[in-house]
Amino acid sequence: MARVPLSKIDLDEDEMIVEGFQAELVSGMKVWVTAVLERTCVYETPDLERRLVPKDQVIVERGQVPIRRRKLTGPPGAAGKGRRAGAKAKAAEDSVNS
């Protein structure tokens, strides 16, 4: 498998990299990735210190990066509001049509 910078991992729109995997910094230090953000990630050093680093400085095995599909439902609570709003609109339309 190819070793590449984390920034070179291509994701679909509904995919995200899941934290909790081993990687290596370009300096050669092995680290544990605890969070993946848009352009950076948080890693834990062997002596349990957390640091922020750009994704292009983190080297990973392309096939070993955990990827998960996101739910594209909007902000928390949006689904419930949408259903209620849709039900109210339908009720209003039904009353006009009757």
Image: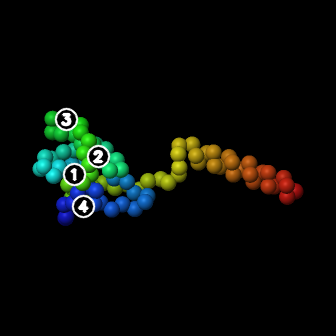
Q: In this rendering, which labeled residue sits more in front, label 2 or label 4?
A: 2
Nearer the N terminus, badge 1 or badge 3? Answer: 3
Nearer the N terminus, badge 3 or badge 4? Answer: 3
Give how far across and how far down residue 93 sits, in percent. Answer: 79, 55
The amino acid on which the numbered mark 4 sits, given as a three-letter code, is: Arg
Circle 4 packing at 10 Å, graded few (<14), some (14-19), many (20+), is some
Instruction: Give the residue at the far left of this rendering.
Output: 28
Kindly report the distance in space between the C-alpha atoms of the residues bearing marks 1 and 2: 8 Å
Q: Are marks 1 and 3 in contact (CB under 8 Å)?
A: no
Q: Which mark is residue 62?
A: 4
- Residue in the picture at 43% in, 60% down: 13
Q: In this rendering, which labeled residue sits more in front, label 4 or label 1?
A: 1
Give how far across and how far down residue 53 sits, in percent. Answer: 25, 45
Q: Is residue 37 visible?
A: yes
Q: Nearer the viewer, residue 39 or 12?
A: 39
Kindly report the distance in space between the C-alpha atoms of the residues bearing marks 4 and 1: 12 Å
Q: Is residue 48 left or right of residue 18?
A: left
Is label 3 in a helix, a strand or a loop? loop
Q: Are marks 1 and 2 in contact (CB under 8 Å)?
A: yes
Kindly report the distance in space between the C-alpha atoms of the residues bearing marks 2 and 4: 16 Å
Nearer the N terminus, badge 1 or badge 2? Answer: 2
The amino acid on which the numbered mark 3 sits, given as a three-letter code, is: Leu
Give how far across and how far down residue 85 sits, in percent. Answer: 69, 48
- The residue wearing badge 2 is 41
Q: In this rendering, which labeled residue sits more in front, label 1 or label 3?
A: 1
Circle 3 packing at 10 Å, graded few (<14), some (14-19), many (20+), is few
- The residue wearing badge 1 is 58
Q: Which mark is residue 48?
A: 3
